[in-house]
């Protein structure tokens, strides 16, 4: 199937490119599906599951909340663990002449 690109206008050419790109993605998807099925079948023939071989879908563990390390001397309900961006009250206390060790809990 030969397509004479010189006889196509810009709109027709854009449509052809879009259809070709879509078909290319379909072919890639079909090939990946076949490969996945082949791998599953091979693993099953050997008595394994994909989860046993590759660990399944792992979930990222969530970082535990860190214990507070610093406390605002003017408002004891405001604390900071020392992780992440410094809170405004911490900056203000440092500007006021306090030292980090003065704010430790």
Image (tube, rainbow, N blue to C red):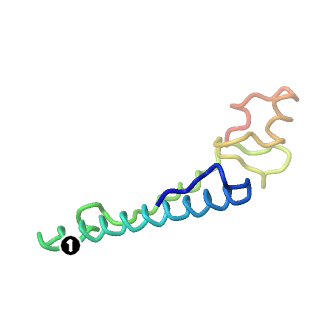
**Residue beneath disc 1:** 41
Task: Point out residue 2 in the picture as x, y percentages from the top left corner.
Answer: 49, 57
Q: Quadrant of residue 37?
A: bottom left
The location of residue 46, given as percent across then percent down, is 11, 69
Residue farthest left in this picture? 46
Frontmost residue, 70 versus 91: 91
33 relative position to 69: left or right: left
Residue 76 as seen in the image, left or right of residue 16: right
Q: Rate crowding at label 1 as few (under 14), some (14 to 19) or many (20 or more) other CA atoms within 10 Å.
A: some
Classify 18 as above or below 101.
below
Which quadrant holds the C terminus? top right
Residue at image location 55% in from the left, 58% down from the top: 21
Residue 102 vertical placement versus 21 (above, below): above
Picture coordinates of residue 68 (x, y %)?
A: 64, 49
Q: Nearer the viewer, residue 74 or 56?
A: 56
Residue located 46% across and 61% down the image: 1
List x then y, in percent, for residue 27: 43, 64
Left or right? Give the position of 39 relative to 91: left
Determine the residue positioned at 79% across, 51% down.
Answer: 76
Quadrant in the rendering for residue 35: bottom left
The relative height of residue 76 versus residue 100 in the rendered view (above or below) is below
Left/right of residue 95 with respect to residue 37 in the rendered view: right
């Amino acid at each position: 199937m030969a397509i004479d690109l010189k006889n196509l206008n810009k709109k027709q050419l854009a449509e052809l490119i879009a259809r070709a790109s879509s078909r290319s993605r379909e072919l890639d998807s079909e090939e990946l599906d076949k490969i996945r099925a082949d791998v599953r079948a091979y693993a099953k023939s050997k008595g394994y599951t994909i989860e046993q071989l590759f660990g399944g879908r792992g979930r990222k563990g969530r970082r535990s909340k860190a214990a507070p390390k610093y406390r605002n001397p003017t408002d004891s309900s405001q604390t900071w663990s020392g992780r992440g961006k410094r809170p405004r009250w911490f900056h203000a206390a440092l500007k006021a002449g306090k030292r980090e060790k003065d704010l430790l809990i």
